[in-house]
Image (tube, rainbow, N blue to C red):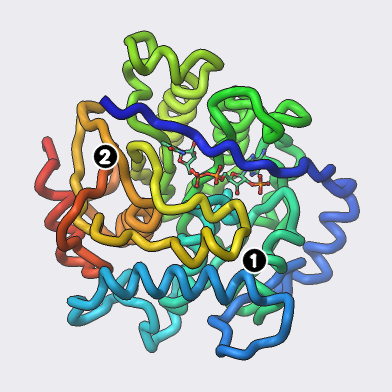
Amino acid sequence: MAVGCFNPVLSPLVPSPPRSRLRAALRSHSHQPTAVSLRLLPSGAAAGRGTWRLAAAAESQAVQEQQARTEEPGEAGGPGAAEASSKLVLVVGGTGGVGQLVVASLLSRNIKSRLLLRDPEKASALFGKQDESVLQVYKADTRNPNDLDPLMFEGVTHVICCTGTTAFPSKRWDGENTPERVDWDGIRNLVSALPQTIKRLVLVSSIGVTKYNEIPWSIMNLFGVLKYKKMGEDFVRNSGIPFTIIRPGRLTDGPYTSYDLNTLLKATAGERRAVVIGKGDKLVGEVSRLVVAEACIQALDIESTEGQIYEINSVKGEGPGTDPEKWEELFRSVQSD
Ligand SMILES: NC(=O)c1ccc[n+]([C@@H]2O[C@H](COP(=O)([O-])OP(=O)(O)OC[C@H]3O[C@@H](n4cnc5c(N)ncnc54)[C@H](OP(=O)(O)O)[C@@H]3O)[C@@H](O)[C@H]2O)c1
């Protein structure tokens, strides 16, 4: 039985700016936030954008493999959707393994994103300096309620949250960035700060959260990661905001958070494009990060996913790619009521 194995990725903790400075920055940029905006880079773009190009290349290689059969891309349809979207998607955890792919896919669909990052420099390193009308980056640590200024949420229509830390002590816990602080305090703070006008909040959680006292999940939960993720889930469920919770199995393909050229180039879903969706926390196994990112984006638009919790795996075979109808069918196939 597979057990979720969380990434031992290193990441520095960057202190937040004084609230007054942040407010001033936000006000003076009410239409041009303290942001990096993105467009897909043409090949041969300036140095410093290399990582994003690689991420984009990895994403397009893998995602395009999956979407080869996409016929009519809707808003959540295939990359390159010609029409600009009316959505503004807040991505929290956009520098993470899943988060990077979410951002890349939103960009390729011409959907505006806003990132909340502890270190905005990471966005420049990953995505390059881009058009502010396409991608905006705000500095925030979800553990600090004071970082979550209401101005950051202005205009946001949808939210995808894929924050996380390691299940076991690691460098990523530096500054007390532990599962309790990220998966519970962070989620509670974020959800409390969100306006009730949000059309959909998609939370990436984990399989096993309802069984954290049972072996083998109790091993993964030694430092509370599954328990705190469940508490975060419950807070989302009781928030009154329309939500969808995606519980991935063990994440594969990546992690892209290594910012390593070879890793990024290898980042494809390969043959594991078929998607298995479950309900009731019964599913075990693995899932490609590309598939999780796609599930999050698709769920934003599929009405039947509102208020639902899904487990997700990916296995060898043909998958739904970016076809909204196929995703809708998949999600519906496990709908209880
Ligand atoms: N790995 C697995 O096998 C597995 C299995 C099941 C579920 N999951 C869950 O799936 C989700 C996505 O996994 P992943 O591998 O893509 O995650 P990841 O690479 O570890 O990325 C985590 C993201 O969360 C951000 N973050 C961490 N602490 C934060 C804070 N205090 N404030 C704001 N942002 C913060 C990180 O930003 P920084 O750049 O600032 O660190 C990063 O962008 C996570 O919730 C993870 O726990 C993972």
Residue 8 visible? The answer is yes
Residue 260's spot in the image, x, y percent? 61, 59
Residue at x 75%, y 53% (from the top left corner): 119
Q: Which residue is mark 2?
A: 310
Q: Please determine whether, in this image, residue 247 is positioned above or below residue 133.
A: above
Q: Tell me the SS state at disc 2.
A: strand
Residue at x 70%, y 44% (from the top left corner): 11
Q: Which residue is mark 1?
A: 126
Q: Nearer the viewer, residue 47 or 149?
A: 47
Q: What residue type is disc 2 on?
A: Tyr
Residue 99's spot in the image, x, y percent? 51, 54
Q: Please determine whether, in this image, residue 171 is positioned above or below residue 156.
A: above
The image quadrant of residue 134 is bottom right
The image quadrant of residue 233 is top left
Spatial separation of the CA atoms under disc 2 and disc 1: 29 Å
Q: What residue type is disc 1 on?
A: Leu
Q: Residue furthest front?
A: 262
Q: Does residue 95 appear left or right of residue 151 in this picture?
A: left
Frontmost of labels 2 and 1 is 1
